[in-house]
Amino acid sequence: MNSPLPPRYAVYAGSFDPVTLGHVDIIERGARIFHHVYVGIGINPDKQTLFSVEERLDLIAQSISDHANVTVKAFEGLTVNFAAQHDAVVMLRGVRTLSDMEAEFTMSLANRALAPDIETMFLMASEKYSHISSSLIKQIARMGAEPNIERLRKFVPEPVIAPLLEKFGQSVPKS
Ligand code: ADP
């Protein structure tokens, strides 16, 4: 008889600027598969972001507050190192389109060369979230709260809405 598999940990890394319902869907699905999911906010000093690292940490934590086996952290450097630090055997990625897949495929090969023991696993985006990206969310928020608030509610977790509109000098309209 083989001995049982040890606990399996995964990392899910990205910019999350800001976190969307598509990201939350991948985190929740990952948390059903793995014993623990470490969500990693990659700090890239060359990339300008709308939200600070602290704000992004806080928004993800608020959006997934009822998941005991998910931890959110920020990290600098390579994702494979972040994975190794947490004994993760898998780097989780979400794919929306074939063009996502092309870039992901190259990245997964590079990561395999760096860390052959850590696998990249892809989860297909859920149909209802497959067109959502953080950049689309920012474009919608920039256009104003009044006509777009219901659209935003379909795309981002509730805790993200007010801080997102605030970044563009808007506030949540009173209903
Ligand atoms: P990055 O800077 O790595 O592209 P993102 O925050 O945009 O960071 O995305 C992190 C991960 O989440 C990537 O694997 C990306 O493909 C995936 N992802 C982004 N949006 C969605 C979505 N709507 N549904 C499923 N996966 C998504």
Image (cartoon, rainbow, N blue to C red):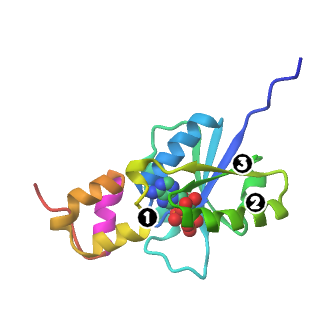
Residue 156 lies, with reference to residue 89, above or below; the image says below
What residue span does the magenta drawing correspond to?
Answer: 159-167
Residue at image coords 71%, 69% = 77
Residue highlighted by disc 2: 80
User: Extreme right residue here?
Assistant: 1
In this rendering, the count of numbered labels is 3
Q: Nearer the viewer, residue 154 or 83?
A: 154
User: Extreme bottom residue here?
Assistant: 46
Q: Position of residue 59 (x, y in %)?
A: 43, 57
Tell whether 104 sits left or right of 98: right
Residue at image coords 74%, 49% = 86
Residue 21 lies, with reference to residue 114, above or below; the image says above
Residue at image coords 43%, 66% = 134
Give whichever of discs 2 and 1 has the lower sequence position: 2
Q: Amino acid at mark 2?
A: Val
The picture quadrant where one finds residue 141 is bottom left
Give the SS element for disc 3: strand
| Pointer 3 with pointer 2, Cβ within 8 A | no
Residue at image coords 63%, 68% = 103
Residue highlighted by disc 1: 133
Residue 52 lies, with reference to residue 22, above or below; the image says below
Alpha-carbon neighbours of circle 3 within 10 Å: few (<14), some, or many (≥20)?
Answer: many
User: Extreme left residue here?
Assistant: 175
